[in-house]
Structure formats: C-alpha cells, structure tokens
Image (spheres, rainbow, N blue to C red):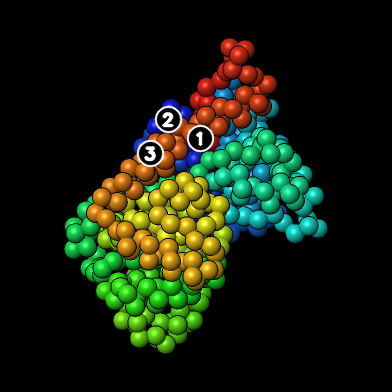
C-alpha cells in the first residue's frame, strides 16, 4: 500500500510500547492491561485511542481491521472515528457465529463500510447468515502475497538437500482440515509408476502426526519416499520451495492460501484442492491442477497428469503468473482502488462530481 502511494500506519497490541519505521511504514506497538490473547468482550481502549489521535479529519483516511474475530471491538472503534473516516474489515477464514449470537454480531459489524474477502464465494456464508447485510459491502482483495524470491532448482537443492524425480512438497500443519492422509494415499498410488518421486512434508503443528506416521509405516512405498521435515526455519523456507517441482495441499477450507502463494512465487506447479480461495489464486486452474476435496482418485489423477507434463519452462511461467496476478505491488494497487471506492461511498461522492478523494492514509 505504501508503494501504491498511501501513507500507512500500523497499530498492534503488544506486551510493551514501541514505535518504529520500516520501508516507509510506521508501526505503533501498544501495551494495555489485557493479556496476549484478547477475549471477545475486552476492549483495547489504549490502541483505539491512539488510532483516533492519529486521524486528521481533513485527510481521507481508511481504517483496515485485520480479521472478523472481534466484532465488539470493531463497533467500539467505529464509535470513536470521525464520520469522514471509512472502516473496512479483512476476512481471515473466520466463520459466522452460531445462530443464537448472529444478531449481536451483525449489530457489532454494522458500522463497517466494507468487507474484504479473497473472493465473493467466501463471503456467501456471511451474507446467507445475515451477518453482513448486503453483497454491495463485499470486495475481492487478497489478504497477502509472498515475499519469496525465485531461484534455480539446482542452486536451491544444494542448500536444502532435497532430492527426487520429482520433488513433491507439502507445507501445512498436520490437521484434519489439511487432509494429509488423502495426500499420502494418492502419492502411494503414484509411486508405483514413479518410484524416484519424493514427498517432503513440512509442518509446525502435528495434531494428527501419529496417524500420519502410522499411515507411512504401513506402506513400504511411502516409508521409502516420504520425509517428515517438521518445522523449517523461516530463513530456509525459500530454498525448500525453490527445490520443489510440485506443491500439494488437501485443504477443505482456506481464507486465502499463503503456502500456495509461496509456491507460485517460487515457480512450483500446484496440485491443490478445488476450493474457492485456490480457484482464485490459480485463476481457475490456469496454473497447475485442482482436484475435489477428499477425493483420492481425483488427487491421484491430477498428480499423475502434472508429473507426466513436467517441463523446465513451467517454473518461470508460473513465476510470471505470480508476478502478474499476486505480487505485492499488484495487490497494493488493487486494494487502493477498493479503499477509494469505499471512501467515496462513505463521503457520498462519485467520480463524476469532480471531488473524488485520494486515499492518503491507511491505518
């Protein structure tokens, strides 16, 4: 957003106060009496006061709140803001509250001028539940991109030590939603015709690690071809992605797909589930292959097809696709257009009246 021309200030609750500036963005870390995990009824008044103090009512300003987890806090913040200040909320894979609480949730979020989702399909549960009142409030804005740089496979593999023909990479926590067992079942079938393939599985949280280990242990093919990496140090992540030929993920639900974006940034061919966020990121399967959630046969056929068609040119083609669609600079420009439209609506302006504001500030 800063590169797109906005003045950006970030406010974040933290255990001690601090202010710093990096790459043209000012960060305010604000301590309060609440603990590290804010509860739904606790108000971060100190942070909200600082946000209000930073606003000049004469400057076009948009407040961007990350996440729909704290509707009551959003309502409190909205009450402090000048009427000229727009407020948008970014979806991060949250789901509406249970039916008995939805009236409260809708009331708390009613002050928002817009809601940002990876795509419009992900907003449907919120519209159908009535928590978000109108489709006109929904805007398609990707929540983030990937900072990873592209590197030649041979160079990256010297750093990572990954080997295989092909190298298949999984980066996702071992949780039911990610469905690693379906991935293992499909890879096992593919190994019959591609015995030199290797699947590397990186993860931070191993909720179903015992089931994954048991599934691998009961198969000679998987035992020889699957490597459980566990957590990868952040500084080494790019080398692992750039070492891979194919990226796999079996998610049933995602708010966006940061790991998938990382794979595209490194030119890795994706073989991922056919869910709304992945449809958007891959442009409907324009790169890689999409397969139905939980469908071992669908995943197996998609993986086989990709292996059969692997080509050295694909990596750079996918990296170009990423730069065209999902690079930070592209997202910043797209988001700025949305913020300006939301601010126009808040101020009752239209482009034709000659008074269209420039979004000078983003908080």
Q: Dot 1 surroundings within 10 Å: few (below 14), some, or many (20 or more)?
A: many
**Of the pair 51 and 269, the residue shown nearer to us:** 269
Find out whether the residues at labels 1 and 3 contact each other: C-beta distance under 8 Å.
no
Is residue 78 among the parts visible in the rendering? no
At mark 1, the secondary structure is helix
Is residue 41 among the parts visible in the rendering? yes
Find out whether the residues at labels 2 and 3 contact each other: C-beta distance under 8 Å.
no
Find out whether the residues at labels 2 and 1 contact each other: C-beta distance under 8 Å.
yes
Instruction: Give the CA distance from mark 2 to mark 1.
Output: 9 Å
At 51% from the left and 35% from the top, the residue drawn is: 335
| Mark earlier in primary sequence (1, 3) | 3
Where's residue 134, x and y in %?
Answer: 72, 39
**Of the pair 276 and 260, the residue shown nearer to us:** 276
308 in relation to 64, above or below? below
At 61% from the left and 48% from the top, the residue drawn is: 121
**Of the pair 167 and 174, the residue shown nearer to us:** 167
Q: Dot 3 surroundings within 10 Å: few (below 14), some, or many (20 or more)?
A: few
Q: Which residue is mark 3?
A: 324
Instruction: Give the CA distance from mark 2 to mark 3.
Output: 16 Å
| Mark earlier in primary sequence (2, 3) | 2
Is 327 on the left-hand or right-hand side of 175? left
Q: Which residue is mark 2?
A: 4
Where's residue 2, x and y in %?
Answer: 42, 33
Is 80 on the left-hand or right-hand side of 191? right
| Mark earlier in primary sequence (2, 1) | 2
- Residue 204 — which label? none
Instruction: Give the CA distance from mark 1 to mark 3.
Output: 15 Å
At 66% from the left and 22% from the top, the residue drawn is: 347
73 in relation to 358, above or below? below
- Residue 335 — which label? 1
Q: The N terminus appears in which quarter of the rendering?
A: top left
């Amino acid at each position: 957003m800063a590169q797109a021309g906005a003045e950006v200030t970030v406010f974040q609750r933290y255990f001690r106060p601090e202010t710093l500036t990096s790459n043209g963005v000012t960060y305010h870390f604000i301590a309060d009496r609440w603990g590290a995990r804010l509860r739904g009824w606790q108000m971060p008044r100190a942070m909200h006061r600082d946000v209000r103090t930073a606003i000049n009512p004469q400057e076009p300003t948009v407040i961007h709140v990350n996440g729909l987890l704290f509707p009551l806090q959003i309502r409190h913040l909205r009450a402090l803001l000048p009427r000229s200040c727009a407020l948008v909320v970014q979806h991060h894979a949250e789901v509406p509250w249970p039916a008995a609480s939805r009236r409260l949730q809708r009331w708390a979020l009613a002050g928002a001028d817009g809601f940002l989702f990876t795509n419009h399909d992900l907003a449907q549960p919120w519209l159908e539940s009535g928590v978000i009142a109108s489709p006109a409030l929904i805007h398609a804005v990707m929540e983030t991109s990937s900072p990873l740089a592209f590197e030649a496979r041979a160079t990256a593999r010297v750093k990572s030590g990954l080997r295989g023909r092909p190298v298949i990479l999984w980066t996702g926590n071992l949780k039911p939603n990610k469905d690693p067992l379906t991935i293992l079942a499909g890879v096992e079938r593919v190994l019959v015709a591609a015995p030199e393939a290797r699947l590397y599985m990186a993860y931070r949280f191993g909720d179903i690690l015992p089931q994954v280990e048991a599934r691998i242990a009961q198969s000679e093919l998987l035992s020889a071809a699957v490597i459980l990496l566990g957590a990868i140090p952040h500084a080494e992540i790019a080398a692992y992605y750039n070492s891979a030929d194919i990226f796999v993920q079996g998610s049933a639900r995602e708010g966006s797909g940061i790991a998938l974006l990382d794979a595209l940034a490194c030119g890795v061919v994706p073989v991922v589930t056919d869910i709304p966020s992945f449809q958007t990121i891959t442009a409907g399967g324009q790169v890689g292959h999409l397969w139905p959630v939980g469908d071992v046969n669908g995943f197996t056929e998609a993986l086989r097809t990709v292996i059969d068609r692997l080509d050295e040119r694909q990596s750079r083609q996918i990296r170009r696709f990423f730069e065209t669609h999902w690079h930070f600079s592209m997202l910043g420009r797209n988001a700025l257009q949305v913020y300006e439209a939301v601010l126009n609506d808040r101020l009752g302006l239209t482009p034709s009246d000659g008074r269209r504001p420039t979004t000078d500030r983003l908080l």
